[in-house]
């Protein structure tokens, strides 16, 4: 089984978020980047398929050379090969188009992408890859087993779970539940050393036009000070909730 | 062009030679692989150790052992072990990096880690025969076995060569019988292998042995109860009693009487590793302290906005950064020397590593002293920032402070290491490896001449600081040169003088390292981008000068009088003089505001 895991290179969850160029661009200054957490759950599941079922795992990212440390970490965790499509990840459609091309050229049976990346939270890419490659698609996937060409997947739905059966080729949008946080792998020292020798192929992008562009970003208003109201002063509380917070 | 041994500074030569900022290694030079290693170790500490910090305070030795097994699975125990024996054969910087970042949560774990990978494994990789290495090192590298190091005895602490443990050869010449008592043995409770030092007959020097320990078949070995210690509470520390313990002759480590040398060389490496193991502990304390200071409101304001707290944060960050800088500088020197010696075919890896580290034994002692004192100070101020809460077991400051205390004692007390740093420097001078007396004479001549009254142009970055460092080196040469002339080899008997001289030496090494790192950074990133690092280098130098002034005065008045004393005191004044004294409060503000804004140690 050939698995492709799509890896987004995203700011660490504790990063301070700022914007530049008139609030149109994310300020990467001083920001540490990591593997997108939803993708990391997927990568860890892919490693399980590698260990238990002998799958071959390739990781892919669309981005500039600065994203390579993230790919190399995935190699250190155990992926067999990495691909970087040399193009800035500007919008969901053009990223999906690049990834779809990689899928077509590489003949992958299973594509694992995160449900969404935690930077721009577009959530479009996995579905678009499936559409562009004519593969089956399961989003919000929290469980996946493969037997031959049959896949059994569990999907999170409102207030419950849905178990589905489908066939390969398949694209999933994975998330926590695919594996648990405690299953996430810390790259071991030997893995880190071996990552150096594994192939990291750089592909030139196919033509794709961004269908959407970011016009402006806004940060949520800073949290104001907490107002304490005496327990016997319910009128003041109601007044604040009604007139200031406007929630009742 | 490949560098040769001559191109890199010898140990101690920093005192008489100038170093270019491009020639020092700094953490900014980590390779992508080293960066990944650093992240992996940090992730391990964050996930496995830090959330269990309180558990380490309950003397849960089994938990320490379980964490050591996890560290082994991730390959942390095998970083420095040659590939031929199941290790990863990584360089010295990578080894130091792992020691550094693994220290971030608790001294209990970093002590267990250090005792195993350093003094528990290293004597075999450095001095073992091929058979010994094949037999034992893979087990130690994989964590199947843990190692311990049995040198200290009730009556042989700092005077390690005076141990009373005996090794008696059997009548058939096949084994030695070891009898004696060892104490403060880290990892004793869960080790399977002990490096034991004992005396054969009335030998002048002790001999090293490799002893296997199986608690189901103890071979005359019994363990004392766990010691109840101020800190590092989950590091297993017990006495080990050997009663007619039989060890095959082929388990002798190196040759008869070579044990003291093994012990000392293992400790040289142990010292720089210990310095490293005091670094992430400081980063963590600083980050926790600044988070607390940003959240703790008094007088309607976060206490981080008060100058009194900012001063602490700035000083803590500066010490940590300076210690880190000097540790990685020396690590690179050691790594280069090992590589060069190995590449020129003269040495095996084993010999190259031994000689590489031995060459920088002075720097190793300097670092051990300086960084262990920094971490003590840092944890102390951490408690102070937390105030009453810091004194409580509910915050991580209290245990960090207790854990830090041992660092000034083990791997040779800081007093022993201070004296060693000067003692070794004098020996190097006698051997002609470092020319101390030539420059010392030049300095004496300079002092009797008329000083220049030109006002130097110090408009470029660090021009003044570098000229001060050059002067501080002259100051050291003046003091050490005159003291040596007066006492000759007897100088070693004047311990208070040795301690004071060592303080000067330590401050010079640290201050120069910090200036060079900040200069290198400024060249690369631009001065504006690294203004905090520049401020730290300047602030550190300012303090270094204060320490040096006091130590210099104490030294000079201890051995000189009359005109000679007056001249040297004048020299002291001249050599510590600033043209433009920095405003250290401004410097502290620059440093503290960055750390407070980032809410983290961020350099």
Image: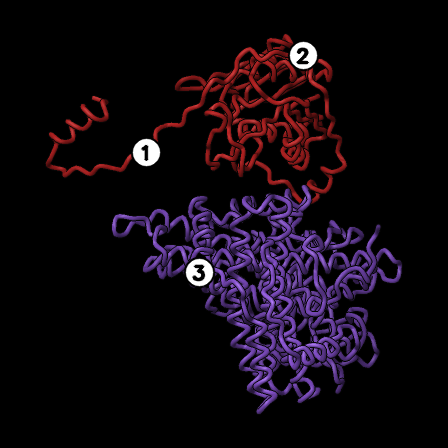
Chain colours: A red, B purple
- Quarter-wise, where is residue B383 in the image? bottom left
Q: What residue lies at 11% left-to-right and 29% top-to-bottom?
A: A235
Chain to which the residue tagged by mark 2 belongs = A
> Does residue B168 appear left or right of residue A162 in this picture?
right
Are labels 3 and 2 on one chain? Answer: no
Q: Secondary structure at mark 3?
A: helix
- Quarter-wise, where is residue B350 in the image? bottom right
Check the image and name the residue furthest to the front: B454
Q: Secondary structure at mark 1?
A: loop
Viewer-proximal residue, A216 or A21? A21
Q: Which mark is residue A223?
A: 1
Q: Which mark is residue A95?
A: none
Mark 3–mark 2 distance (CA, rounded to whole Å): 59 Å
The answer to whether residue A172 is seen in the rendering is: yes
Viewer-proximal residue, B122 or B135? B122
Compared with A247, B444 (above or below) is below
| Comes first in the chain, label 2 or label 1 | 2
Mark 3–mark 1 distance (CA, rounded to whole Å): 34 Å
Chain to which the residue tagged by mark 1 belongs = A
Q: Secondary structure at mark 2?
A: loop
Compared with B291, B135 (above or below) is below
Are labels 3 and 1 on one chain? Answer: no
Q: What residue lies at 52% left-to-right and 56% top-to-bottom?
A: B536
Chain to which the residue tagged by mark 3 belongs = B
Q: Which mark is residue A207?
A: 2
Q: What residue lies at 67% left-to-right and 55% top-to-bottom?
A: B21
Check the image and name the residue furthest to the right: B345
Tell me where residue B594 appears, x and y as whole percent.
46, 47
Disc 3 target residue: B399
Q: Residues within 10 Å of mark 1 (few under 14, many from 20)?
A: few
């Amino acid at each position: 089984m050939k698995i492709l895991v799509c890896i987004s290179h995203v700011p660490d969850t504790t990063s301070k978020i700022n914007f530049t160029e008139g609030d149109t661009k994310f300020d990467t200054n001083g920001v540490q980047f990591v593997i997108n957490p939803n993708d990391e759950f997927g990568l860890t599941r892919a490693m399980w398929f590698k260990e238990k079922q002998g799958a071959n795992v390739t990781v892919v990212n669309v981005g500039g050379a600065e994203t390579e440390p993230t790919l190399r970490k995935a190699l250190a965790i155990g992926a067999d090969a990495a691909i970087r499509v040399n193009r800035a990840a500007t919008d969901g459609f053009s990223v999906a188009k690049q990834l779809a091309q990689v899928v077509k050229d590489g003949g992958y049976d299973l594509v694992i992408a995160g449900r969404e990346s935690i930077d721009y939270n577009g959530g479009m890419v996995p579905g678009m890859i499936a559409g562009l490659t004519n593969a089956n698609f399961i989003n919000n996937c929290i469980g996946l087993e493969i037997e031959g060409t049959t896949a059994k997947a569990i999907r999170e739905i409102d207030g419950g779970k849905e178990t589905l059966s489908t066939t390969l080729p398949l694209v999933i949008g994975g998330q926590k539940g695919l594996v648990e946080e405690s299953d996430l792998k810390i790259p071991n020292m030997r893995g880190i050393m071996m990552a150096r020798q594994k192939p990291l192929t750089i592909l030139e992008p196919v033509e794709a036009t961004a269908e959407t562009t970011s016009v402006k970003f806004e940060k949520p208003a800073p949290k104001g000070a907490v107002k304490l109201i005496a327990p016997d002063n319910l009128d003041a509380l109601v007044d604040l909730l009604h007139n200031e917070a406007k929630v009742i | 062009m490949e560098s040769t041994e001559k191109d890199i500074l010898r140990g101690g030569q920093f005192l008489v030679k100038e170093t270019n900022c491009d020639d020092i290694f700094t953490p900014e030079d980590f390779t992508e692989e080293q960066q990944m290693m650093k992240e992996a170790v940090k992730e391990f500490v964050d996930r496995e150790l830090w959330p269990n910090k309180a558990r380490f305070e309950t003397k849960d030795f089994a938990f320490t052992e379980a964490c050591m097994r996890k560290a082994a699975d991730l390959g942390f125990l095998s970083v420095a072990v040659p590939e031929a024996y199941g290790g990863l054969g990584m360089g010295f910087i990578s080894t130091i990096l792992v020691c550094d970042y693994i220290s971030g949560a608790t001294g209990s774990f970093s002590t267990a880690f250090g005792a195993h990978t350093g003094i528990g494994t290293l004597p075999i990789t450095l001095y073992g025969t091929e058979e010994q290495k094949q037999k034992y090192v893979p087990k130690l590298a994989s964590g199947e076995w843990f190692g311990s190091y049995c040198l200290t005895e009730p009556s042989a602490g700092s005077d390690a060569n005076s141990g009373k443990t005996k090794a008696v050869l059997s009548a058939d010449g096949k084994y030695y019988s070891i009898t004696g008592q060892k104490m403060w043995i880290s990892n004793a409770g869960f080790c399977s292998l002990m490096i034991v030092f004992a005396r054969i007959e009335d030998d002048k020097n002790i001999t090293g042995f490799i002893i296997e320990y199986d608690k189901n078949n103890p071979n005359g070995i019994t363990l004392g109860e766990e010691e109840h210690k101020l800190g590092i509470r989950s590091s297993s520390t017990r006495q080990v009693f050997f009663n007619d313990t039989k060890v095959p002759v082929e388990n002798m480590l190196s040759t008869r009487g070579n044990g003291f040398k093994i012990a000392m060389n293992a400790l040289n490496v142990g010292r720089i590793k210990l310095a490293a193991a005091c670094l992430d502990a400081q980063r963590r304390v600083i980050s926790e302290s600044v988070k607390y200071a940003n959240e703790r409101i008094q007088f309607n304001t976060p206490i981080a906005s008060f100058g009194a707290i900012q001063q602490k944060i700035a000083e803590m960050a500066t010490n940590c950064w300076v210690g880190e800088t000097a540790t990685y500088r020396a690590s690179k020197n050691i790594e280069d020397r090992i590589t060069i010696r190995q590449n020129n075919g003269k040495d095996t890896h084993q010999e190259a590593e031994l000689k590489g580290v031995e060459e920088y034994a002075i720097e190793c002692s300097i670092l051990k002293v300086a960084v262990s004192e920094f971490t003590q100070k840092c944890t102390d101020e951490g408690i102070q920032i937390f105030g009453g809460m810091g004194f409580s077991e509910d915050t991580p400051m209290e245990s960090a402070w207790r854990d830090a205390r041992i660092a000034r004692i083990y791997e040779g007390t800081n007093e022993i290491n201070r004296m060693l740093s000067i003692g070794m420097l004098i020996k190097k001078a006698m051997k002609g490896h470092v020319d101390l007396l030539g420059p010392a004479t030049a300095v004496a001549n300079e002092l009797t001449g008329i000083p220049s009254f030109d006002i130097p142009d110090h408009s470029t970055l660090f021009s003044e600081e570098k000229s001060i460092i050059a002067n501080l080196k002259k100051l050291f040469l003046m003091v050490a040169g005159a003291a040596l002339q007066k006492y000759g080899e007897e100088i070693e008997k004047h311990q208070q003088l040795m301690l004071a001289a060592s303080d000067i030496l330590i401050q010079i090494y640290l201050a120069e390292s910090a200036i060079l790192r900040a200069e290198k950074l400024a060249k690369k990133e631009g001065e504006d981008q690294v203004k905090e690092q520049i401020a730290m280098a300047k602030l550190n130098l300012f303090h270094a000068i204060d320490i040096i002034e006091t130590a210099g005065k104490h030294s000079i008045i201890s051995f000189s009088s009359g005109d000679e004393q007056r001249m040297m005191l004048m020299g002291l004044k001249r050599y510590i003089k600033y043209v433009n004294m920095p405003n250290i409060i401004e410097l502290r503000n620059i440093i503290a505001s960055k750390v407070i804004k980032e809410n983290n140690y961020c350099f």
